[in-house]
Image (cartoon, rainbow, N blue to C red):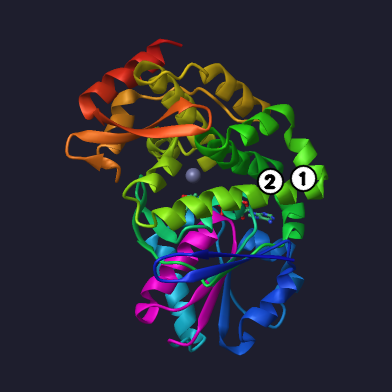
Amino acid sequence: MNKLQYKFSGKTTTYYLDADLSYLEKLVDKSHTVLITDEHIFGKHQKRFGGWNTIVISAGEQFKVQATVDNIIEQLIEFGADRKTFLVGIGGGVVTDITGYVAAVYMRGLSFGFVPTSILAMVDASIGGKNGIDVGVYKNLVGTIRQPEFLLYDYSLLKTLPKEEWVNGFAEIIKHAAIKDAALFKELEKNRLTLYQKDKAALAKLIRRNVAIKSAVVEKDEFEHGERRLLNFGHTLGHAIENVYELSHGHAISIGMVAACMISEEFTPFKETDRVMGTLKKYGLPTLAEFDPREVMAVLRMDKKKVKDSMNYILLNKIGQAIVKVIPINELDKLLQSIITAR
Ligand SMILES: NC(=O)c1ccc[n+]([C@@H]2O[C@H](COP(=O)([O-])OP(=O)(O)OC[C@H]3O[C@@H](n4cnc5c(N)ncnc54)[C@H](O)[C@@H]3O)[C@@H](O)[C@H]2O)c1
Ligand SMILES: [Zn+2]
């Protein structure tokens, strides 16, 4: 096992990398803990939940909504959960987001930890304390920023992760490389998904590096006044098309990253859209999609990154270096039109 710590404003979070799920017994008091997971993970790993109070939610983004929160709260009441109860979300980003959110509001706040079980949750969703739910087509419109006590990584859980979810997670890994780590980008260009699926050591190293990239950004700027915004690379358009067209998060941000690369070429010295597209394709990710710019713009107007009539858009100067560019909504509208007609 490999222990790391990151210091956030209100809390130091401990990361147990390369650990085993059974270590959870050492971290929390079983009789005062409730695990929250989804039906897929519970179905595949039922034995590992033996003896724990567990709440199982339906799997899928469409359940990352207030109705599921209400349902979890009712079950917490049935378990007699009080302010000393510890919550542990064991799952992908949907489970970790909703667990963190429930933990923030139940009795005005419980302590919580995560066991991320998807690549995406391991390198991204479980890190950084942002926990929220969707409202209609608006992704993560409602939420909190509150850090977990710990993150416990058991890579053996990935054995049951469907192939398309590996692909999804690699969208965030490629994002981290594109905004922060040119050497990692090169490594990804050279390798392929099956290598990381087969080679445990390569995967462990890759996850550790991505955990470090995201955690360091959040440590510097927990409340997203500067640096943390860079993590939104590909996410502005990505979130808009994700819920309107029911794409997976990874697919949506992959398309969003390509659009952001094309917009970068208009405003910065960036010239490597082809390289980014090639790498996304290599990992099975889509790079272009048909979408209706008017519909997308309607959602963008509600985006949290919008300030008055402009948008903080994340662009690349070069691979490994991202910047924030303020783009007026009108101009963005035209740019998106031209991206669509350019194809
Ligand atoms: N809070 C944040 O900072 C943050 C960052 C990025 C993404 N997110 C959120 O994360 C969510 C996406 O995360 P995700 O891709 O993990 O989605 P997810 O939780 O829906 O998981 C994807 C699918 O894989 C299944 N699964 C997960 N782990 C498994 C395993 N080990 N074995 C078998 N099946 C498994 C799930 O049941 C689900 O069907 C989105 O809601 C997104 O908004 C949040
Ligand atoms: Zn994301």
Furthest residue toward right? 198
In the picture, measured across the screen, residue 110 lies left or right of residue 157, that is: left
The residue wearing badge 2 is 206
Residue 245 x %, y %? 44, 35
Residue at left offset 61%, top offset 86%: 29
- The residues tagged by marks 1 and 2 sit, at their Cα atoms, a distance apart of 6 Å
**Rendered view: 12 above or below 229:** below
Residue 142 x %, y %? 33, 58
Q: Indicate the quadrant where residue 103 lies.
A: bottom left
In the picture, measured across the screen, residue 94 lies left or right of residue 298, that is: right
The residue wearing badge 1 is 202
Q: Specify the quadrant that holds the N terminus.
A: bottom right
- Determine which of the numbered discs, if any, sits on residue 224 in the image: none
**Rendered view: 10 above or below 185:** below
User: Which residue range is magenta in the image?
Assistant: 83-112
In the picture, measured across the screen, residue 243 lies left or right of residue 288, that is: left
Q: Indicate the quadrant where residue 322 lies.
A: top left
Is disc 2 surrounded by few (<14), some (14 to 19) or many (20+) residues within 10 Å? some
In this view of the protein, can residue 156 be seen by the observer?
yes
Tell whether label 2 touches label 1 (CB within 8 Å): yes
Is disc 1 surrounded by few (<14), some (14 to 19) or many (20+) residues within 10 Å? few
Between residues 295 and 273, which one lies in front from this camera angle? 273
Between residues 265 and 286, which one lies in front from this camera angle? 265
User: Which element type, helix, strand or loop, lies under badge 2?
Assistant: helix
